[in-house]
Image (cartoon, grey):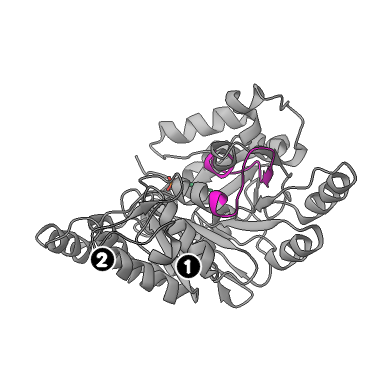
Amino acid sequence: MIPYGKQDVDQSDIHAVVSVLKSDFITQGPVVPAFERALADFCGTAHAVAVNSATSALHIACKALDVGIGDMVWTSPVTFVASANCALYCGASVDFVDIDPGTLNLSVECLTAKLELAERSGQLPKVVIPVHFAGQSCEMEAISKLARRYGFRIIEDASHAIGGRYQEGLIGNGRFSDITVFSFHPVKIITTGEGGMALTNDPALANRMQRLRSHGITRDECEMTAASDGPWYYQQIELGYNYRMTDIQAALGLSQSKRLKQFVERRNELALRYDRLLAGLPVTLQTLSSGCYSARHLYVVRLQLERIGRSRRDAFEAMRQRNIGVNLHYLPVYLQPFYSAMGFRQGYCVEAERYYAEAISLPLYPGLTEEEQDYVIENLREVLTA
Ligand SMILES: *Cc1c(COP(=O)(O)O)cnc(C)c1O
């Protein structure tokens, strides 16, 4: 089976991990800060906080922005559930802003309209979480203008998007947001097995997230409620978690980060090759915005079902039968049973649902060969036009 996504681990990665295993520290050693520094420098951000998943990063990002009971967080419905769950972890409620049918990112028009309504009913969000779908940045300049106008904070869910660029800057540089989150799950652009990172230019937010990832404990006397008892002393001053990344994971991530640019370039080459070779097939491609360089985490196509003699389900299964690991990203989050039970109904975000009814993700990862890609394209052609 050709999978839809796959990590690229080479001998240098293995060597980096083995070195840590043979060293004095396999967690809480020097490699986590080195990995944090490397990615902060790469993105041009002041601070980076490594954690054990992007889900954890989203959680502590919400916490650091004081999201709590009674607050509202808005995100895109076309995302992985973690983009929404993080608000619920904090006791806040979640709402969804429909997508732009071209870029498949949260629509700035829908956001603007929803904010106007929310202002009138006194229900403005505290935080908005734009998700850079498939690796392409949302329209962050416009969203950040709305943030200033309506007073909300921004967490970029850039789980798909490390290595991508927006307006000449790397995604994660924090120019238009408070915090940016990356994922290092093996299907993402670079991996640490499990892992994530939160980047920010705000030292107070960085400090708060560092504390939250490790039980809410501080060793900084200035933050303590009383004088330190001695060099061994620490205080827990709030309720945090054990969300730390290990040095073993960070070694893999640091080693992978050296090939990050190369991975994203290869993904872009393969994606452009898909664009070219799929021309003429009854599929609609994701619109690429000017000023964006996508990290190309996913390659999604929308089937033009009225031109195809079979259902999406049927086409999907036919591809799987041909050993092509197509996938679907994503069922609108609010249609998950857990969210439906909160009162969300079919029809809530029309464009997200229309997209979901037509979408298929094709295999895309740096190790995909052109022969494999040709096999995918040939089979898609047969399935859609036979
Ligand atoms: C993968 C993903 C996450 C969660 O990442 P983990 O590191 O697996 O916790 C969050 N948001 C989006 C958009 C993702 O794709």
Circle 1 crowding by C-alpha within 10 Å: few under 14, some 14–19, many from 20: many
| Amino acid type shown at disc 1 | Gly
Of label 1 and label 2, which has the lower sequence position?
2
Q: Nearer the viewer, mark 1 or mark 2?
A: 2
Where 6 sits versus 172, above or below? Answer: above
Looking at the picture, how far across and down is residue 203, in whole percent? 51, 69
Where 335 sits versus 378, above or below? Answer: above
Q: Residue furthest left?
A: 22
Q: Tell me the residue at 73%/45% (across/down).
A: 97
Q: Tell me the residue at 87%/41% (across/down).
A: 121
Looking at the picture, how far across and down is residue 380, in whole percent? 52, 43
Q: Which quadrant holds residue 178?
A: bottom right
Left or right of residue 97, residue 135 in this image: left
Identify which residue, 208 or 95, lies in the foreground. 208
The kind of secondary structure element at disc 2 is helix
77 falls in the magenta region: yes
- Write down the residue under mark 1: 163
Looking at the picture, how far across and down is residue 17, in whole percent? 19, 59
Where 179 sits versus 376, above or below? Answer: below
**Residues marked 1 and 2 touching at CB (< 8 Å):** no
Marks 1 and 2, how far apart at CA: 21 Å
Q: Tell me the residue at 38%/64% (across/down).
A: 220
298 falls in the magenta region: no
Which corner quadrant holds the C terminus?
top right
Q: Residue 31 got which mark?
A: 2
| Amino acid type shown at disc 2 | Val
